[in-house]
Image (cartoon, grey):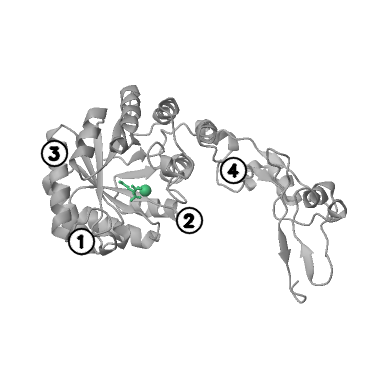
Amino acid sequence: MRLKILDSTLREGEQQSGVRFHSQDKIHLLRLLEEFQVDIVEVGHPGISAEDEQVCKEVASASRRAETLMHARAISEEVQAVHRAGADWIGIWASINPISLTAKFGDKSPAQIKDRVAYAIEEAKKLGLQVRFTIEDASRTSWEDLFYLGKAAVGAGADRISLADTIGIWTPNECGETVKRAVEEIHSDIEVHLHNDLGLATANALAAIDAGASVIDTSILGIGERTGIVDLLQLAVILKEKIGFQHFPLERIPELSHAVQWTTGFRPDHLRPIVGKNAFTHTSRYHVQAVQKEAHTYEMFPPEQVGRKRKVIGERPQLDSPVLSTALRVGSPFEKGASELKYHRNGPGTRWVLMDHRVDSRSTLYAIQRTFEDNEP
Ligand code: HCA
Ligand code: CU
């Protein structure tokens, strides 16, 4: 089976702090995801409220080529809500590790969790839904418990088992080993849902692919709970550059990135791979000279391939340049005599270091102060 991408911008992405999509936003993002050749779109969690159910329904009925999946806890009302909202797939999830054993439903034993999960899966199958069952917090769950719950879910009819690194604690080795064992012993297609708390989500996704995972969860720009999950845009570039996937229209990446920025207010930082402001900016004079002769000296591929443009700088700011001194003047933490301040040693043992001179919408420039010990260079 070819590797599939399940994009969860519309569900996991809505768990990013401050994000809530209108159905029109979701439909717009769904279109872009479908055009980007994503296989499955996770559209939301209809069991949360009547309003969420309505939004999920509108989004599902707007889908054209992608399959739709909706999230549900292992309880009947939520399974029914997914059915009413018209999804192709239900994504039921539960955890079995001791940390969350009693925290959520008051289940007292692994057997109670297993029974509740099996019952929900059977109910979903009877309603004609395809079932993905996720073991939440799989990365902190013993192999015995993973096997126990995974096997029970497959026995109850689950079409695919997903392993979630819910708190983003896996390293690529750990992730790869668990996925490999699950593929060999659970005898089901294996999906992975990888959070990025240690910045390893994408590396873990690659390890999971090597280990035989069939489906990888992503979101546009990686948005999601806390620090989010695997970034669809980065993963698509890696899959093309390193693994030879040809079907993603990478030149549309800025369009997807902007759509998420407009609908969420989230701004990727300048250093972000592929979409960051600096991703194709060459600064050092030597780099600039080389790139102007032979772009690939310092570029993996032409920026146009991912819808971006090359930018060359080739100059360093002067230590007393207006940009730097203005940055320290406006909005800086030292108001007194601020307009005179420059980037300089400010008395023995202390200097102000400009970390960022971003201008925000109110034209405030930020400066960050750092204090050095006398003997520090
Ligand atoms: C959540 C948890 C989840 C579930 C993933 C899944 C996770 O926020 O509800 O159901 O596949 O990270 O474990 O997103
Ligand atoms: Cu998650």
Distance, label 3 to label 1, CA atoms, is 23 Å
CB contact under 8 Å: marks 4 and 2: no
- Tell me the quarter of the picture where residue 149 sits: bottom left
Give the structural element (helix, strand or loop) at label 3. helix
**Image location (x, y in percent) of residue 243:** 41, 45
| Count of numbered labels shown in the rendering | 4
Mark drawn on residue 145? 1
Q: Amino acid at mark 3?
A: Glu
Q: Nearer the viewer, residue 192 or 149?
A: 149
CB contact under 8 Å: marks 1 and 2: no
Task: Give the mark nearest the N terminus, 3 or 4.
Answer: 3
CB contact under 8 Å: marks 1 and 4: no
Distance, label 2 to label 3, CA atoms, is 38 Å
Distance, label 1 to label 4, CA atoms, is 41 Å
Give the structural element (helix, strand or loop) at label 1. helix
Distance, label 4 to label 2, CA atoms, is 16 Å
Q: Amino acid at mark 1?
A: Asp
Q: Nearer the viewer, residue 184 or 140?
A: 140
**Badge 2: residue crowd in 10 Å (few <14, some 14–19, many ≥20):** some
Q: Amino acid at mark 2?
A: Gly
**Would you name the residue on which mark 3 appears?**
123
Distance, label 3 to label 4, CA atoms, is 45 Å
Distance, label 1 to label 2, CA atoms, is 27 Å
Give the structural element (helix, strand or loop) at label 4. loop
Give the structural element (helix, strand or loop) at label 2. loop
Q: Amino acid at mark 4?
A: Gly
Q: Nearer the viewer, mark 3 or mark 4?
A: 3
